[in-house]
Image (spheres, rainbow, N blue to C red):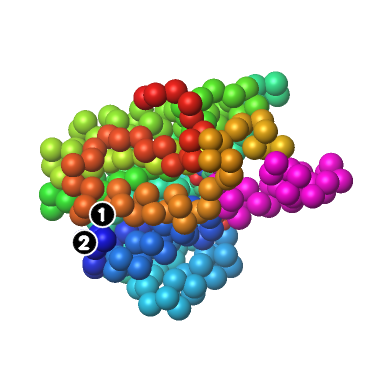
């Protein structure tokens, strides 16, 4: 399928690894120019190099997407590199924040990381997208925003708020051609998740496979397996595309059948 986004300019936060990097690769393959943003310079440079080797036009900007001043700098870096921004994929996020060890600062930090980072970048991009009458914004939410779990209560609450914010943005700007949607991944075997398995395995004296099996028992997935980054990235790329021209304010589960309730 031709996504119809050749030469569109896309910002991808959380772009050096995992779902963000996979989404950048898919958008790049479709001909978009990419500005990758993440905090760690070495990983970011590696990621940019990998995309360049695939023929993608890419620039990289070291930034913390959860800091207001860095959000401006991310936007400016994309404009400096490619002249404008048409697409924003907000993948920076994560965390846990269990209820059992409630911590005020941690709830604030996870709200800033999972909600404000995305909303602030969207709002930085919206005016010019609106002026041109075309924009695509995709927030990377989580099944945790749909189904509460005390083990990651702060993270889930933040991802739920992100869905709400996406809907507000969508109601505000769809009529101007700026389409805002969310993908809601279930457990996905990203670098971050695999590193978590490994750390847990070392703590418990078991294998990383054992840890994954335990995760699948605790939160069963209808398909019986976790996802891969590229499976989420394909959904993101579609929502960023010309083909998704009648989709606005959607929350697309990409979870192998984790969530059991109907919307
Ligand atoms: N993997 C899953 O099972 C899963 C499930 C549901 C939802 N999600 C969501 O998917 C998104 C991506 O997760 P992932 O599993 O792909 O993560 P990952 O493999 O750990 O990669 C995270 C990426 O985000 C960057 N990042 C983290 N904090 C950042 C910040 N403050 N500013 C800019 N970049 C930042 C990281 O680079 P630096 O650390 O160098 O900044 C890295 O590039 C998150 O929003 C997460 O909540 C993941």
Mark 2 vs 1: CB contact within 8 A = yes
- Quarter-wise, where is residue 79 in the image? bottom left
Q: How many marks?
A: 2
Q: Position of residue 176 (x, y in %)?
A: 13, 42
Question: As displayed, is residue 174 above or below residue 128?
Answer: above
Instruction: Look at the numbered disc 2 and give the secondary structure of its residue.
Output: loop
Q: Main secondary structure of the magenta part?
A: helix
Task: Give the Cα separation between the discs numbered 2 and 1.
Answer: 6 Å
Compared across the picture, whether 13 is left or right of 132 comes to right
Magenta run includes residue 201: yes
Q: Which quadrant: the N terminus?
A: bottom left
Specify the label residue 4 is tagged with: 2
The structure residue drawn at horizontal position 57% and vertical position 27%, both measured from the top left corner, is: 154
Q: Quadrant of the C terminus?
A: top left
Residue closer to the observer: 20 or 62: 20
Residue extending furthest toward the front: 223
Q: Where residue 192 sits: x, y (%)?
A: 61, 51
45 up-or-down from 242: above or below: below
Q: Which residue is mark 1?
A: 241
Q: Which residues are magenta?
A: 187-213
Residue at the image position 49 percent from the left and 74 percent from the top: 49
The numbered disc on residue 148 is none
In the image, is residue 14 above or below residue 33? above
């Amino acid at each position: 399928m031709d996504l119809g986004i050749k030469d569109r300019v896309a910002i991808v936060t959380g772009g050096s690894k995992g779902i963000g990097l996979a989404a950048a690769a898919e958008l790049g393959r479709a001909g978009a120019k990419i500005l990758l943003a993440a905090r760690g310079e070495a990983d970011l440079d590696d990621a940019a190099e990998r995309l360049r080797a695939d023929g993608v036009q890419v620039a990289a900007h070291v930034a913390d997407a959860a800091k207001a001043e860095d959000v401006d700098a991310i936007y400016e870096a994309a404009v400096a590199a490619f002249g404008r921004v048409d697409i924003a994929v907000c993948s920076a996020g994560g965390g846990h924040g269990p209820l059992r060890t409630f911590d005020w600062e941690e709830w604030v930090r996870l709200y800033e990381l999972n909600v404000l980072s995305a909303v602030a970048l969207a709002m930085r991009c919206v005016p010019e997208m609106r002026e041109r009458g075309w924009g695509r914004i995709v927030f990377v939410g989580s099944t945790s925003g749909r189904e509460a779990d005390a083990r990651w209560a702060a993270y889930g609450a933040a991802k739920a708020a992100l869905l709400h914010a996406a809907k507000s943005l969508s109601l505000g700007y769809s009529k101007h051609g700026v389409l805002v949607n969310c993908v809601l991944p279930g457990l996905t075997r990203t670098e971050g998740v695999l590193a978590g398995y490994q750390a847990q395995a070392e703590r418990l004296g078991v294998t990383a496979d054992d840890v994954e099996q335990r995760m699948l028992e605790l939160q069963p997935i209808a398909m019986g397996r976790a996802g891969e980054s590229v499976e989420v990235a394909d959904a993101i790329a579609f929502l960023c595309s010309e083909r998704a021209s009648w989709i606005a304010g959607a929350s697309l589960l990409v979870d192998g059948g984790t969530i059991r309730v109907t919307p």
